[in-house]
Image (tube, grey):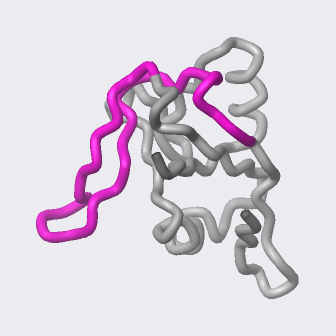
Amino acid sequence: MEPIFHIADRAAWRAAAASGLYAQSTRDQTLEEVGFIHCSYRHQLLDVAKNFYADVTTPLVLLTIAPELLDAPLVPEPPTEGAQPFPHIYGALNIGAVLTATPFVKDENGQFIFNE
């Protein structure tokens, strides 16, 4: 199964790694507030980064997640009717499903770098 991706605040990720569960939905919103954790497929990742994280100045990490290792349900859902679906995790992200957590940085032109 193809991995999915989540952009996380580095401090939130570090706290989650210590506790065993990650419960941030998206930028500045928790799982409890939103009801699911926003993720992206590979082909969606850079657009999500550009559209929602371009102005973030705090350190970010990119979580690469193995869907088959998730404890919570994964549901592909479109953000609006007729749009392409995005993967949503309906519950806390168990740390064991995270394959890698790598710094998610920008190049000299301010564009996010996604090196697989």
In the depicted structure, whether residue 109 falls above or below residue 11: below
Quarter-of-image position of residue 113: bottom right
Q: For the point 34% across and 36% down, which residue is it?
A: 74
Near-viewer residue (96 or 39): 96
In the depicted structure, whether residue 106 falls above or below residue 98: below
Residue 14 position in % (x across, y down): 78, 28
Q: For the point 74% across and 51% down, which residue is it?
A: 60
In the depicted structure, whether residue 24 falls above or below residue 101: above
Residue 89 position in % (x across, y down): 39, 35
Q: Taking 6 as reference, is 11 left or right?
A: right
Q: Taking 60 as reference, is 66 left or right?
A: left
Residue at the farthest bottom position: 109
Residue 26 position in % (x across, y down): 50, 45
Q: For the point 44% across and 19% down, which residue is it?
A: 71
**Image quadrant containing the C terminus:** bottom right
Q: Does the magenta stretch include residue 86?
A: yes
Residue at the farthest right position: 108
Q: For the point 76% across and 67% down, which residue is it?
A: 115
Residue at the farthest top position: 19
Residue at the farthest left position: 81
Quarter-of-image position of residue 107: bottom right
Near-viewer residue (94 or 23): 94
Near-viewer residue (43 or 106): 43
Q: Taking 16 as reference, is 34 left or right?
A: left
Q: How many labels does the image show?
A: 0
Q: Is residue 21 magenta?
A: no
Q: What stretch is highlighted in magenta?
A: 71-100
Residue 79 position in % (x across, y down): 26, 58
In the depicted structure, whether residue 8 falls above or below residue 35: below
